[in-house]
């Protein structure tokens, strides 16, 4: 097994931060879509049916 270098650790951290940001964005879009649906509206991107 290879040893983790400082550069590899930084890369892993960047990947994890990006993944968390993506999860938060999906959650926000879902919550916005639900709020718009309660108002009888559709999100701009049309993902809510």
Image: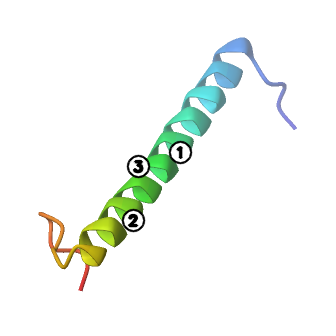
Q: Quadrant of the N terminus?
A: top right
Dot 2 falls on a residue whose secondary structure is helix
Q: In this view, which residue lies farthest toward the left?
A: 44
Mark nearer the viewer, 2 or 3: 2
Image location of residue 46, percent across then percent down: 15, 73
Dot 1 falls on a residue whose secondary structure is helix
Q: Is residue 27 above or below residue 19?
A: below
Image location of residue 26, percent across then percent down: 42, 57
Q: Nearer the viewer, residue 23 or 2?
A: 23
Residue under the image location 56 percent in, 43 percent down: 20
State the image quarter where residue 2 is shown. Answer: top right
Residue under the image location 64 percent in, 19 percent down: 10
For marks 1 and 3, the one nearer the N-term is: 1
Residue under the image location 15 percent in, 74 percent down: 41
Image location of residue 48, percent across then percent down: 26, 78
User: CA gap, disc 2 to disc 3?
Assistant: 9 Å
Dot 3 falls on a residue whose secondary structure is helix
Mark nearer the viewer, 1 or 3: 3
Q: In this view, which residue lies farthest toward the bottom?
A: 49
Residue hosting label 3: 25
State the image quarter where residue 5 is shown. Answer: top right
Residue hosting label 1: 19
For marks 2 and 1, the one nearer the N-term is: 1
Horizontal side, residue 1 vs residue 40: left or right:
right
Residue hosting label 2: 30
Mark 1 closeness class: few <14, some 14–19, many ≥20 residues within 10 Å: few
Horizontal side, residue 21 vs residue 13: left or right:
left
Q: Quadrant of the C terminus?
A: bottom left
Count every numbered label the image shows and give the total: 3
């Amino acid at each position: 097994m290879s040893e983790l270098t400082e550069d590899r650790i930084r890369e892993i951290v960047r990947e994890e931060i990006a993944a968390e940001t993506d999860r938060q964005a999906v959650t926000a879009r879902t919550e916005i879509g639900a709020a718009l649906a309660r108002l009888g509206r559709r999100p701009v991107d049309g993902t809510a049916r």
